[in-house]
Image: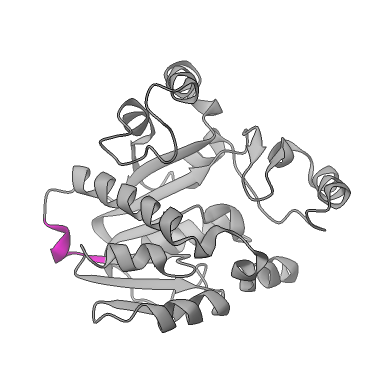
Amino acid sequence: MMGNREYQLGFSRKGNAMFDQQGRQKKAVTMICVLSDFIDTPLSDLTLLNVGCSTGIIDEYLSRFFKNVVCIDIDDNAINFANNNFKKDNLSFEICDAMNLKFESSTFDVVVCSQVYEHVSDANILMEEIFRVLKPEGLVYFSAGNKLMYIEPHYNLPLLSVLPLSVANLYLKATGKGEFYYEQHLTYWGLKKLVSSFEIFDYTIKILKNPDKYRATYMIRKGSLKHNLSKLLAKYMIWLIPGYVWLLQKH
């Protein structure tokens, strides 16, 4: 729908965390830790596509490890920022719709899709396009929020994501946070269905068990109450974990 397209076009102008250099780079470090743990070949031999790269802070870090990093986003403000601030021979930024990628099939060894699926108007088309441009045996770094979360991270409001859309819109208006709730989160089961074309390697529990190894203490501090509760949920009620990190492999 057009409203969703307009919302995506100006996402970086909404005062969100896309320009947080330190926070974004921490996410990139975790990505490298997870991918290095799984991939046997040197990352420096591989090409990477980041779908929904925004301001390019994550990508500058990724480009230190990968042979070539291509980054796309529909947000022209974010892409302009990236092009003006990160100039490297193996790093490029393009305005491109994630649901209509301009690349040939079987082009990339790795695709990053981090906290993106809920922002597009059709997540199924997004994943079909990612599958298409990924090489056989290629990997997707897929991080995703769960609809069944207590605090919705984009607006910092309790239970926003589980409400019917009409009620969520009223909730946003009443709290002065917005006019329309565009994000379309899925449950754990919905996410599994979304990525059913891939083989899933779940790194969520691995990260929760050892956040130090995957440099994820910025999300969850080892030994904290949040950490212990998350490990308990992961063991018995994985469907209630607020977010997931999966590696998806194309076979």
187 or 203, which is in the foreground? 203
- Image coordinates for residue 71, horizontal then vertical, percent: 39, 71
Foreground pick, 62 / 219:
219
Q: Residue at x 34, y 60 (%)?
A: 111
Can you see residue 96? no
Q: Which residues are magenta?
A: 42-47
Is residue 251 in the magenta section? no
* 123 sits left or right of 59 in the view: right
- Which residue appears farthest toward the left when viewing the image? 41
Judge whether residue 82 can be spotted in this image.
yes
Q: Is residue 195 above or below residue 92?
A: above
Q: Residue at x 62, y 67 (%)?
A: 11
Does the stretch in magenta take in 44?
A: yes
- Name the residue at 40% across, 61% down: 130
The image position of residue 228, as x and y in percent, is 44, 19
Q: Residue furthest front?
A: 22
Image quadrant where residue 146 sits: top right
Q: Residue at x 37, y 76 (%)?
A: 103
Quadrant that contains the N terminus: bottom right
206 vs 53: above or below: above
Scheme by which the image is coloured: one colour
Q: Is residue 217 above or below residue 113?
A: above
